Amino acid sequence: VLHAQVEAGTLCPVTMTFAATPLLLQLLPATFHDWLLPLRSDRYDSHLLPGGQKRGLRIGMGMTEKQGGSDVLSNTTHAERLADDSYR
């Protein structure tokens, strides 16, 4: 809770990192198993290195909307039904 009061901007990547790690434990190919220790770290490593060579990793999500800005209610989406009944 104190973390949120000091800097709310980092809550999303911190939460995603700790929520994603158990899933990655099950699904990561063996070539990425060296990422698990840095994902569990409480350190930030800004070096441009492969994930397994860093002291700390964070998982985040980058996204943008066509409309941009902070008015999320103005965002629109469009989906097209495909032949296999999925949507794109």
Image: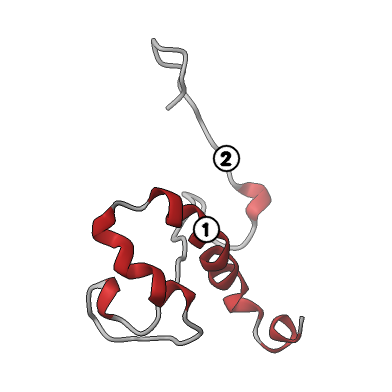
Q: Residue at x 41, y 12 (%)?
A: 84
* Amino acid bearing label 1: Pro
- Residue at image x 63%, y 48%? 74
Residue 75: x and y in percent read 59, 46
Seen from the viewer's position, the closer of residues 10 and 81 is 10
| Residue 51 x, y percent position in the rendering | 29, 72
Q: Position of residue 87 (x, y in %)?
A: 46, 23
Choose between 58 and 39: the one closer to the eye: 39
Mark 1 sits on what residue?
Answer: 22
CA distance separating discs 1 and 2: 33 Å
- The residue wearing badge 2 is 76
**Could you say which disc has been placed on residue 14 in the image?**
none
Q: Is residue 49 left or right of residue 14?
A: left
**Residue at 71% from the left image edge and 80% from the top image edge:** 4
Image quadrant for the C terminus? top left
The coloring applied to the image is: secondary structure
